[in-house]
Image: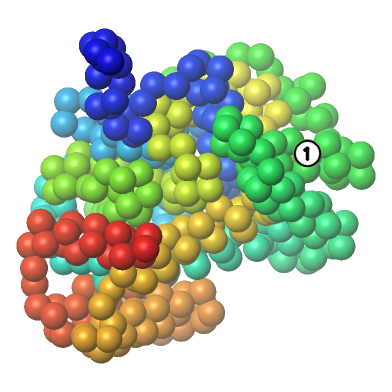
Amino acid sequence: MMQLPGEIMSQTVHPVDEKLPASRLAALGLQHVLVMYAGAVAVPLIVGRALKLPPEQVALLISADLFACGIATLIQSLGISGIGIRLPVMMGVTFASVAPMVVMAGNPAIGILGIFGAVIASGIFGLLIAPFVSRLLPYFPAVVTGTIILVIGISLMRIGIGWAAGGLPVINGQPNPAYGALDGLGIALFVMLMILGIQKYARGFVQNIAVLLGVIAGCVVAGILGKMSLAKVGTASWFGLVLPFQFGIPTFDPVACVTMCLVMIVVMIESTGMFLALGEMTGKPVSTTDLTRGLRADGLGTLIGGIFNTFPYTSFSQNVGLVGVTGVRSRFVCVAGGLILLVMGLVPKLGALVEAVPTVVLGGAGIVMFGMVAATGVRILQGVDFKANRNNLFIVAISLGFGMIPLVAPTFFNKFPEELKPLLESGILLATIASVALNLYFNGAGNAETARTDAANAAAKADH
């Protein structure tokens, strides 16, 4: 039978570039937003409290954050003239920036305007060094990539477990009474079982939105048990304009700028691992050029964040796990998510509605999604040759140990200089440095094509 031109075109479109119907995009995009919302607003809340800002200014920080999240996500997933990796990526404020910014907040000579100046400087720095960082791709063969992705998943699991338990065990110096409560744990378990049930018995689009449906079901149960309140939704305004430099013209403290540039290096190394993970999940291997575009988007997103009075941006690893759970590879789903974030930044009432979702509900979904990231790392490592090359075992073993240091021993590096803390507090960065160094020691350097082929072969072996 003769194929029509439209049919031929549809067969040549990669799933990453597939444009789904608008109704599906909206639901799948909302699912991505729900997954990353808690992490997105956490940093403005923490820094706002450290700066002792009044509630209305903290609300401004959150609205600006959501608005900038939307812009950065559109740039990363849609792509503009040499910037943006064009994969299903959601952007959010990096937690690597929290500790340095809290320290800056306590210094009257820096303050909030100094923080925004440092963020702008780090964004420009990121744009400049992106091509140099992308040249590290030859040092990421399958044994390195798999190890890093495994550590990313394990690191994220701490967040998911914390959500399931009800948040942080201590809030503002006081024990959290909701932490570990049986009803909260029950809701988290219910959400997880709902997701697993939908994943097994549903088909098609319903299966693709298993996480969204699980979260909605969890919200219903939480509401019945009195664990979810919509009071803030009623009091929130319908519209709030987000403007650049709402807090004033930024200042540029040299030490603060250098510190935030170190944070940007951490962000870019972590993003490299996440981009490689997405390349494996979507079947679209990441090239050096792709990596440069993606890292430039991190830098540009951070620059935009500083202009709109918010913080450094990174590719959210939470959403990488969601891609693995749903199997939906279209980047336009994240474009839809970016548009939703833009609207939420301008309509505080919508932001308040999403914020009302209890942490325990997200916890049930988080354990599933973050586990998928770790499982992707295991899948890649499954195809690595450990029998003929036993040195690969040492690479994985020692790198995994380095990656666990900040998780199991948060005070391990307390005696080190404060300037190094942003680097040493990232288990992902430590695992990356260790795995790259050990691979060079045992296996030597390859090239970008060898690294991609190695990763592809490992994934193919794992599939069989």
Give amino acid for label 1.
Ala
Image coordinates of residue 119 in percent, x first then y, are 33, 44
Is 318 situated above or below 391?
above
Image coordinates of residue 114 in percent, x first then y, are 37, 45
| Residue 388 shown left or right of residue 302 in the figure | left
Q: Residue at x 71, y 48 (%)?
A: 197
Q: Quadrant of residue 447?
A: bottom left
Q: Residue at x 65, y 63 (%)?
A: 161
| Residue 142 shown left or right of residue 99 in the figure | left
**The C terminus - image quarter:** bottom left
| Residue 13 shown left or right of residue 40 in the figure | left
Q: Residue at x 13, y 80 (%)?
A: 443
Q: How many marks?
A: 1
Front position in the image: 434 or 87: 87
**Within 10 Å of the Cα at label 1, are there few (<14), some (14-19), or many (20+) other Cα atoms?**
some
Is 206 situated above or below 350?
below
Colour scheme of the rendered structure: rainbow
Circle 1 SS class: helix
Front position in the image: 230 or 212: 212
Q: Quadrant of residue 354?
A: top right
Image coordinates of residue 45 in percent, x first then y, are 59, 45
Image coordinates of residue 446 in percent, x first then y, are 8, 68
In the picture of the structure, the residue carrying the numbered disc 1 is: 217
Is 331 situated above or below 424?
above
Front position in the image: 359 or 224: 224
**The N terminus - image quarter:** top left
> Can residue 310 be seen from the camera position used here?
no
> Can residue 162 be seen from the camera position used here?
yes
